[in-house]
Amino acid sequence: MRHLLFPVLGIAAFVPALLTAAGLPVFDFVTELTAPVSYAGPIVGVWMAAGVVVLLVLTRRHPERIAETARVHIEEDAPADPRQGGSVVS
């Protein structure tokens, strides 16, 4: 029960700050951000939207590039020779 309760309480504690940083004045007890910090939320939103557009274009025109990027992050099997793994052998 506490593994669910404490994370939810932690998230709830940061919701007012997150909404204020995004430029949404939802809570009266949180002071609005001043310029230039107040520009961060919209800039991040535009940056994320641009990333989604690039992803959609790559998925439509060059789907193999997305697959190649996924392969970069897949771990290969461990090398058979321990000296090739970067560990120190005495």
Image (cartoon, helix red, strand yellow):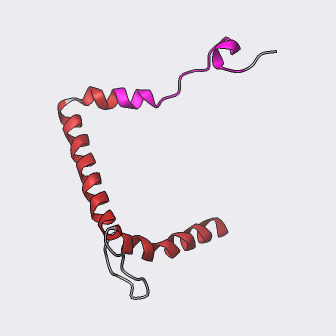
In this picture, residue 55 sits left or right of residue 73: left
Q: For residue 41, which quarter of the picture?
A: bottom left
Left or right of 7, for residue 65:
left
Is residue 35 positioned above or below 70 on the image?
below
Residue 75 magenta-drawn?
yes
| The residue stretch that appears in magenta | 68-87
Q: Is residue 18 magenta?
A: no
The quadrant of the image that shows the C terminus is: top right
Q: Is residue 31 left or right of residue 14?
A: left
Up-down: is 74 above or below 12?
above
Please provide percent x and percent y for residue 16: 43, 77
In percent of width and height, residue 62 lies at 22, 29
Q: List x then y, in percent, for residue 25.
A: 33, 80
Point out residue 64 in the picture as x, y percentages from the top left corner.
28, 26
Residue closer to the observer: 62 or 20: 20
User: 4 or 37, which is in the foreground?
Assistant: 37
Q: Nearer the viewer, residue 59 or 17?
A: 17
For residue 39, which quarter of the picture? bottom left
* Residue depicted at x 60% and y 71%: 5
Position of residue 43 relative to residue 88, above or below, is below
Visible residue check, residue 1: no
Q: Residue furthest bottom?
A: 28
Residue positioned 32% across, 70% down in the render: 38
Quadrant location of the N terminus in the rendered image: bottom right
In the image, what residue occupies the spot 46% across and 31% down?
73
Q: Quadrant of residue 3?
A: bottom right
Instruction: Tell me if I can see residue 86 in this picture.
Output: yes
Q: Which residue is located at x 69 percent, y 13 percent? A: 83
* Count of marks, rendered view: 0
Whether residue 18 is situated above or below residue 31 in the rendered picture: above
Residue positioned most to the right: 90
